[in-house]
Image: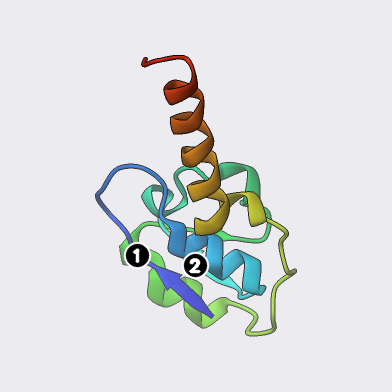
Amino acid sequence: MAVNPVTTGSGSNLKLAAYLASGLPVVTTAVGLRGFEGHSEGVVVVERDGFVAAIAGATLTKGQRRTIEDLSWDNLGRRLHDVYARLVARGGP
């Protein structure tokens, strides 16, 4: 099981992508889910004070393995490279 008790921050939490891709059951906060709302099926979303109950009541079997390679570090790096290459090709922003 993966627990993701994130309460602050900005952007997406890429650890959540790794948890989902591995098929782990996930308990997270709404802040921890940011950016992955489209992958929330089967994810338990609770405030931190509800984690103990959510974990105790969770099924500890593997979740459905998700295909979210588009969110991997490799693909994010490729996308950033493509943006830079387009900017350089046209001479700037």
Vertical arrangement, residue 61 with respect to residue 76, above or below: below
For the residue pair 64 and 42, the one nearer the viewer reads as 64
x then y, percent, for residue 53: 45, 74
Q: Label 1: how many residues lie within 10 Å, few (<14), some (14-19) or many (20+)?
A: some
**Residue that numbered label 1 is attached to:** 5
**Residue at horizontal 47 percent and vertical 15 percent from the top:** 90
- Which residue reaches farthest left? 8
Q: Label 2: how many residues lie within 10 Å, few (<14), some (14-19) or many (20+)?
A: many
For the residue pair 88 and 44, the one nearer the viewer reads as 88
**Residue that numbered label 2 is attached to:** 27
x then y, percent, for residue 5: 34, 65
Left-right relation of 42 to 58 = right
Report whether residue 61 is seen: yes
- The amino acid beneath tag 1 is Pro
- The amino acid beneath tag 2 is Val
Quadrant (top left, top right, bottom left, bottom right) of the C terminus: top left
x then y, percent, for residue 68: 66, 55
Tell me the quarter of the picture where residue 67 sits: bottom right
Spatial distance from mark 1 to mark 2, Cα to Cα? Answer: 8 Å
